[in-house]
Image (spheres, grey):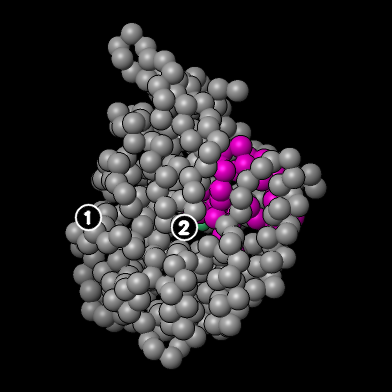
């Protein structure tokens, strides 16, 4: 990173850095894809495309190649490299995984716990398949481990697998977990078993959001295990989602935790670790899906994630670590070169849109700063691209 200017007090107000890599993006499909690709490509040189577009799950090699073509066609004029994932169902064919491993833009597998987030119904309902020799998921994990292709983990369990205590709650084996405990259970129970069963595999624990997860990362340094932090988890806590009523704009899985978790996440993300990188999880949804009888999960930071990350690092006094987090760690994890393109960011108020309209007329929920910022007279973000 090159500092271009500082204020009288020595605070950085303008800098140049390598263009980022998004370790967890949602370029969607159809009108939503056309809406979000320019936003993503402006901010990221490379984006790992999550394999759960609506009605087009990437559950085979052929699907993956079709989606890759769609993304590349739609990105014309917006240069970006898409890294592709295969969606791990209980039935994903290991031969498709073997074939995919030969493709330079194949970025490995994605694990969804069945039913716990958007379009995850086809995911894995029984996590023990992941460490049980002979199961299809085990075989798929073995193949990508050999090929050094990462597995992205939506680290959550829906049900207690053993008698377990999380914070002040006790569960018996088989009990449904509280939404706020799903990540903690995965950290305690499932993730260590995955790592033990596939020690050579590269694992990316995505959108880490709990103190328990952070403690795990700190106590178990492992060159094969990485973590991503979303753009919104370090900036919000659950008060923002529930103040005065439920605010669907901030409803996401993993759910916003209490402020103690957010504070610890802010430190963890910004301290310059070798294993923590950007994965914004910018998740666009039609307004009608967010404001509905069952609110779709996802916070749409697609148009402002780099700016939110810059704000986080600036607030923590850690801007010198921002380039590593955003542009170096994920390329290292995926075995690709960091981008040779550079961007300039500067201090200056900017206002993300809270509503977008797709080319077919669909309204899409965006992102806005929580109301508490209004008290400080600030409604927007404090960082922007200098262009
Ligand atoms: Zn996601």
Q: Which residues are magenta?
A: 22-51
Picture quadrant where residue 159 is located: bottom left
**The stretch drawn in magenta includes residue 214:** no
Residue visible at 55% across and 27% down in the picture: 385
Tag 1 residue: 218
Residue visible at 22% across and 62% down in the picture: 220
Q: Nearer the viewer, mark 2 or mark 1?
A: 2
Picture quadrant where residue 44 is located: top right
Residue visible at 69% across and 54% down in the picture: 71
- Judged from this view, the residue extending furthest toward the top is 8
Q: Residue 124, how many percent across, how many down?
A: 48, 77
- Label 2, label 1: how far apart the Cα atoms are: 22 Å
Tag 2 residue: 334
Mark 2 Cβ inside 8 Å of ligand 1: no
- Judged from this view, the residue extending furthest toward the bottom is 134
The relative height of residue 257 versus residue 204 in the rendered view (above or below) is above
Q: Is residue 158 visible?
A: yes
Residue visible at 38% across and 70% down in the picture: 201
Element carrying mark 2: helix
User: Count of labels shown?
Assistant: 2
Mark linked to residue 5: none
From the viewer's perspective, tell me whether residue 165 is left or right of residue 3: left
Picture quadrant where residue 49 is located: bottom right
The relative height of residue 280 versus residue 201 in the rendered view (above or below) is above
């Amino acid at each position: 990173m090159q500092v271009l200017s500082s204020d009288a007090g020595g605070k950085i107000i303008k800098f140049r850095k390598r263009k980022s890599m998004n370790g967890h993006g949602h370029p969607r499909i159809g009108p939503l894809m056309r809406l979000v690709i320019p936003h993503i490509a402006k901010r990221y040189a490379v984006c790992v495309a999550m394999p759960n577009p609506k009605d087009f799950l990437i559950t085979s090699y052929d699907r993956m190649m079709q989606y890759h073509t769609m993304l590349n066609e739609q990105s014309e004029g917006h240069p970006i490299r898409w890294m592709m994932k295969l969606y791990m169902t209980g039935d994903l064919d290991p031969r498709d995984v073997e074939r995919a491993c030969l493709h330079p833009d194949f970025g490995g597998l994605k694990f969804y716990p069945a039913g716990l987030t958007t379009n995850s119904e086809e995911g894995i309902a029984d996590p023990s398949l992941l460490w049980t020799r002979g199961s299809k998921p085990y075989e798929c994990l073995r193949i990508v481990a050999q090929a050094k292709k990462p597995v992205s983990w939506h680290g959550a369990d829906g049900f207690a697998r053993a008698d377990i205590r999380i914070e002040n709650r006790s569960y018996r084996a088989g009990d449904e977990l509280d939404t706020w405990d799903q990540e903690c259970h995965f950290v305690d129970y499932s993730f260590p078993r995955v790592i033990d069963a596939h020690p050579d595999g590269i694992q990316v624990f995505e959108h880490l959001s709990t103190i328990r997860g952070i403690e795990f990362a700190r106590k178990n340094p492992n060159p094969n295990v990485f973590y991503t932090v979303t753009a919104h988890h370090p900036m919000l806590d659950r008060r923002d989602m529930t103040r005065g009523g439920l605010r669907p704009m901030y409803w996401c899985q993993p759910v916003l935790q209490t402020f103690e978790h957010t504070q610890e996440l802010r430190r963890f993300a910004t301290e310059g670790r070798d294993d923590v990188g950007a994965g914004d999880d910018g998740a666009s949804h039609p307004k009608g899906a967010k404001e509905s009888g069952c609110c779709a999960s996802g916070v749409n930071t697609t148009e402002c994630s780099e700016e939110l990350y810059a704000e986080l690092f600036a607030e923590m006094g850690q801007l010198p670590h921002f380039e590593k987090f955003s542009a170096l760690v994920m390329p290292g994890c995926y075995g690709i070169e960091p981008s040779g393109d550079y961007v300039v960011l500067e201090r200056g108020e900017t206002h993300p849109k809270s509503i977008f309209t797709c080319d077919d007329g669909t309204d899409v929920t965006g992102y806005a700063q929580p109301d508490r910022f209004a008290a400080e007279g600030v409604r927007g973000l404090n960082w922007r691209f200098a262009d």
